[in-house]
Image (spheres, grey):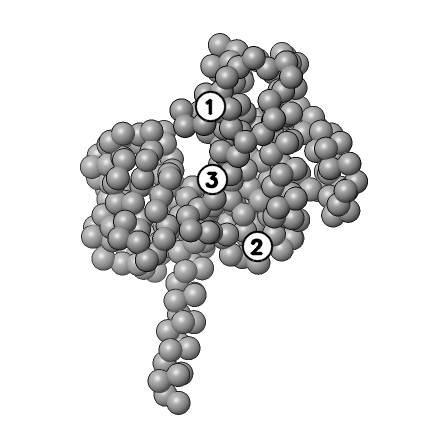
Amino acid sequence: MLIGGIEAGGTKIVCAVGTTPNNIEAKTTFPTKSPSETLLEIKRFFSRYELNSIGVGSFGPIDLDKSSKTYGKILNTPKLNWRNYNLLEQLKEDYSIPVYINTDVNIACLSEYYQGAGKNVNSCLYITIGTGIGAGFVKNGEIYQGTSHPEMGHIYIPKHPKDSFNGSCPYHKSCLEGLGSGTSIKKRHGKTGEDLTKEGFVWELESYYLAHAIVNYSFILSPERIILGGGVMKQNNLYPLIRKKVSCLINNYVNNVNDMENFIMPPVLNDEQGVKGAIQLAINQREREGKSHLKHKTKQYF
């Protein structure tokens, strides 16, 4: 039987079915609309297949506390018609099979850990820099989660001395997302990053903000690898700028990040991290549940 994967982004939905993340049999993409319209499109695609489970990576924030009454609900999202919508509950009702949910960036990290740029290390941090900024951390195959998923895109960082922009985040203004996201680039400069490729100061600012964030993450989490994805990182000139600044900021304080080429890397899954990660999430959760069930039965037997 097949596993379903859903990458629910703020602008588009990607659905796929496969036996593993590397064996996807069919895939479709369509715009993110209202919950009812979007769920109908998802149902049209999945109705052609017999599924044993579904993995979901969604835009957020999402309530990921399994003990919460609102577990699986999309919370205070800027997409107003999705606010307080319980995506997990609706999918379970629609399909009557196990459904597992996490954030879109967490499952992207999971996918890169198992099949991509992080597959030869024990821990990796995946940061997506696009319309917003988010990050996920995987160690020994497990997604890190506290009371909720970490909001690493909203950490506070020092402002560049020559940056007069106040920030674009509606909650915090000058947090990382407010200063370094694709949205902030467009609001600060009046153009998208694609139209500013040759503007050196744009990428000086961007590399400054991302480097400061990476150093903070590195000191706290000590990841073996950091993977930078998202639309803003299509500017390949950013990687050497960020590596140089990170190296200067760390200043030889820790010795596990000396090889910057292998420490800070681009993703390698060709923008399929999300949907492959959704399938991987379902596989991992089903395996974990199977082990838990076996352990419970063994205890009962003895």
Q: Position of residue 301 (x, y in %)?
A: 36, 88
Instruction: In the displayed orientation, state which residue is furthest to the bottom.
Output: 302
Question: Which residue is labeled 2 in the image?
Answer: 139
Crowding near the residue tagged with mark 3, few <14, some 14–19, many ≥20 C-alpha atoms within 10 Å: few
Q: Looking at the image, can residue 197 be seen? A: no
Amino acid type, mark 1: Lys
Marked residue nearer the N-terminal end (2 or 1): 2
Q: Nearer the viewer, residue 247 or 147?
A: 147
Name the element at disc 2. Answer: strand
Q: Is residue 63 left or right of residue 152?
A: left
Q: Cα distance, mark 2 to mark 1?
A: 31 Å
Instruction: Say whether disc 1 or disc 3 marks the residue closer to the N-terminus.
Output: 3
Closest to the camera, between mark 2 and mark 1, is 1
Reading the image, the residue beneath label 3 is 151
Q: Which residue is mark 1?
A: 173
Q: Which mark is residue 123?
A: none
Please tell me which residue is depicted at 27% across the width and 35% down the height of the picture: 82
Q: Label 1, label 3: how many angstroms apart (C-alpha)?
A: 15 Å
Name the residue located 55 percent from the left edge and 41 percent from the top edge.
126
Estimate the x, y position of residue 108 in percent, counting from the top left. 49, 43
> Residue, x 62% and y 55% (percent of image)?
122
Q: Are marks 1 and 3 in contact (CB under 8 Å)?
A: no
Q: Nearer the viewer, residue 137 or 108?
A: 137
**Which mark is nearer the camera, 1 or 3?**
1
Q: Position of residue 63 (x, y in %)?
A: 34, 47
Residue 45 located left or right of residue 220:
left
Q: Secondary structure at mark 3?
A: loop
What secondary structure is marked by label 1? loop
Q: Report whether residue 138 is seen.
A: yes
